[in-house]
């Protein structure tokens, strides 16, 4: 066992206070806070945004179905062995695109953006 393997093994057995002293913890914390924060803001404003634009409750149903599909994607990601940081980066990038689509205000963008953000929020 070389020195790199010992370091990785030692980093996997950290308690919370020890983990909070690592750069990896704070990088993951910042990425999750930004991703989950924007997704949570979108979830909280689904009904107000849809109501102000005259869309029906179908958007809310679509949102939650996409969130459930996102959960399925996260389970599938774990089963295939894809690297979790890579999956998280992809989902955060797609969520950013979805938020930009919603903000564009184009016809139909509300539904397309809701699909993107819903899937990514569910997978997070």
Image (cartoon, rainbow, N blue to C red):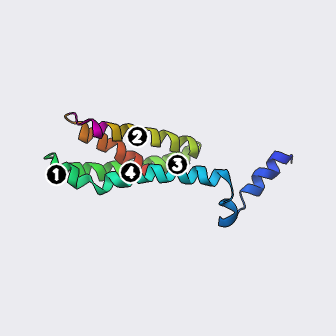
Disc 3 marks which residue? 31
At x 23%, y 37%, the residue is 105
Does residue 65 lie above or below 95 as drawn? Answer: below
* Distance (Cα) linking label 1 and label 4: 19 Å
Point out the stretch of residues depicted in magenta.
101-106
Mark 3 and mark 1: Cα distance apart in space: 31 Å
Asked if the residue under mark 3 is in contact with the one under mark 4, i.e. CB atoms within 8 Å, the reply is no
Q: CA distance from mark 2 to mark 4?
A: 9 Å
Q: Is residue 57 visible?
A: yes
Q: Which residue is mark 1?
A: 51
Give the Cα separation between the discs numbered 1 and 2: 23 Å
Alpha carbon of mark 3 to alpha carbon of mark 2: how far?
A: 12 Å
User: Element under label 1?
Assistant: helix
Counting from the top left corner in percent of width and height, residue 34 is at: 46, 50
Earlier residue among tags 1 and 4: 4
In the image: residue 39, left or right of residue 1: left
**Please, which residue is most extreme toward the top here?**
106
Q: Earlier in the sequence, mark 2 or mark 4?
A: 4
User: In the image shown, does 124 or 47 lie closer to the viewer?
Assistant: 47
Principal SS element in the magenta part? helix
Q: Where, by quadrant of the figure, is residue 48 drawn?
A: bottom left
Mark number, residue 39? 4
């Amino acid at each position: 066992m070389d020195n790199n393997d010992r370091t990785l093994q030692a980093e996997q057995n950290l308690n919370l206070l020890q983990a909070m002293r690592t750069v990896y913890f704070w990088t993951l914390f910042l990425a999750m806070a930004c991703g989950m924060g924007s997704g949570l803001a979108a979830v909280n404003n689904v009904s107000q945004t849809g109501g102000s634009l005259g869309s029906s409750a179908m958007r809310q149903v679509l949102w939650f179905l996409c969130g459930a599909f996102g959960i399925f994607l996260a389970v599938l990601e774990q089963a295939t062995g894809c690297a979790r940081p890579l999956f998280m980066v992809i989902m955060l990038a797609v969520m950013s695109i979805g938020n930009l689509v919603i903000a564009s205000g184009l016809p139909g963008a509300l539904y397309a953006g809701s699909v993107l953000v819903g899937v990514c929020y569910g997978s997070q």
